[in-house]
Amino acid sequence: MSVRFDTAVDAPAPSRSRIAPWALVSAAMFAVAWGGNEFTPLLVMYRLDHGFSPVVVDAFLFAYVLGIVPALLLGGPLSDRLGRRPVMLPAPVIAAAGSLVLAFGADSALLLVVGRILSGIALGLGMAVGGSWLKELSVPPWDTAAGPGAGARRAAMSLTAGFAIGAGTAGVLAQWAPWPSGLAYALHITITIGAGIALVAAPESRPATPVGERARLIDDLKIPAASHRRFWLVIAPVAPWVFGAASCAYAVMPALMADHSGGRPIAFSALLCVVALGCGFAIQALGRRIDTPRSARAVIVALSFLVVGMALGAVAAGRLTVPLAVLAAAVLGCGYGMALVSGLQEIQRIARPDDLAGLTAVFYSLTYIGFAIPAILALVVENWPAVGYPVMFLFGAAVAAASLVLVIGNSRAHLPETGSDRGNPDR
């Protein structure tokens, strides 16, 4: 990537608006996250009311990764090159378009996939570009009161709040309100338009690189910090568990509980989403106290939750009782929340200024591998019914335990001690 370091001296004067600049970006991230997860509690509805098979429904869940990953990998580096505003401003518009397609595509697999991909593109831009923009607006001169790590926590909490509230609202509306396949999407369009208008007022934190100083785009897509040893030994082992844990809690578990949820499968699916993401949001608020730059303590805590959560998932999948399902979702949600915020904080410590958006994009791309888990498990059960979900949850607990051992062994290794060490792959 081209090397260019912006300083506070070069930054424009901070806005005098009563709304903190970072909050404007946070609102847009919240809105695109809402759109990314409002679909999840409706998986049961698409299976029961619209005739799609479990494997196809789980494929719908994974489809938006086809939009997320390119948006992450291209959006982050492009925003380093062109500035945050021009790359992030289209995200709310794309999110609204995705919801519009989904609202009228309940009986069409093609339209559902297209809508999910559009939602994924918006979310990918929100995560990589919005997260970097919010982080930069959480330090002087834009925010003189924020402490270390505030940007990572605000980004993680904005996304998690959007995921949780969007899922909870969609499930309630689909279960009890008219137009169950479209009303939630119409509400999201309204919210997203408001957030998009507010985003226009957010100040640019990283001006575009002058045309004459730009490297080739292919060079901008290179992310040297991705070869940092700490990235592969500490961050990469926990990244797929971010949405691996979440998808087990609010996609796999609701499907298993569809016939054991008191006749309200969509509402129960929404409940598990809210429980998992609510616990994830709550524990992120404690991330500042758990995280330390001297070790991978926060990542270790995340993986510990995940080992316990997957074990509880095995028990819940075998017993199929409401209390056990809720408990498993809560613990897995804590694992999701800590994995997300601890990974972002580690990323922001090792990234160079020119690598921040790109490395954040790589991290998020790895996290979304976890959304393949429900489809993989559904395929295994369809082809080898004797294996069963309890066994697969126990296998997941074993993999999480192996990841935990790897991170513990490298907890204090390759730490970036000074600003000049950031992004140095030899550390």
Image (cartoon, rainbow, N blue to C red):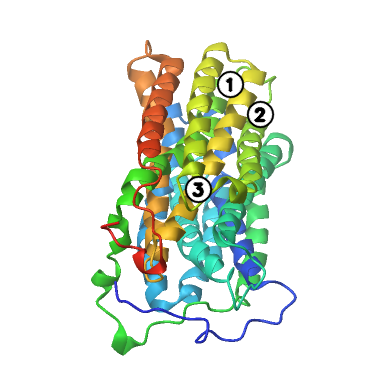
Q: Amino acid at mark 1?
A: Met
Q: In front: mark 1 or mark 3?
A: 3
Verify CB contact (< 8 Å) between mark 2 and mark 1: yes
Q: Is residue 64 above or below residue 275?
A: below
Q: Position of residue 303 (x, y in %)?
A: 47, 35
Quadrant location, the C terminus: bottom left
Q: State the residue in front, 370 or 384.
A: 370
**Residue on which the image places disc 1:** 257
Q: Position of residue 63 (x, y in %)?
A: 41, 45
Q: Is residue 406 left or right of residue 163?
A: left
- How far is the residue under mark 2 from the one under mark 1? 8 Å
Q: On residue 249, which mark appears?
A: none
Tag 2 secondary structure: helix
Quadrant location, the N terminus: bottom left
Q: Residue at x 47, y 78 (%)?
A: 206
Tag 1 secondary structure: loop
Location of residue 23 by image quarter: bottom right
Residue 236 visible in image:
yes
Residue 104 visible in image:
no
Location of residue 172 by image quarter: top right
Label 2: how many residues lie within 10 Å, few (<14), some (14-19) or many (20+)? Answer: many
Tag 3 secondary structure: helix
Q: Amino acid at mark 3?
A: Ser
Q: Position of residue 108 (x, y in %)?
A: 47, 42
**Marked residue nearer the N-terminal end (1 or 3):** 1
**Residue on which the image places disc 3:** 342
Q: Is residue 243 above or below residue 52?
A: below
**Residue on which the image places disc 2:** 268
Q: Amino acid at mark 2?
A: Phe
**Marked residue nearer the N-terminal end (2 or 3):** 2
Q: Is residue 17 above or below residue 357?
A: below
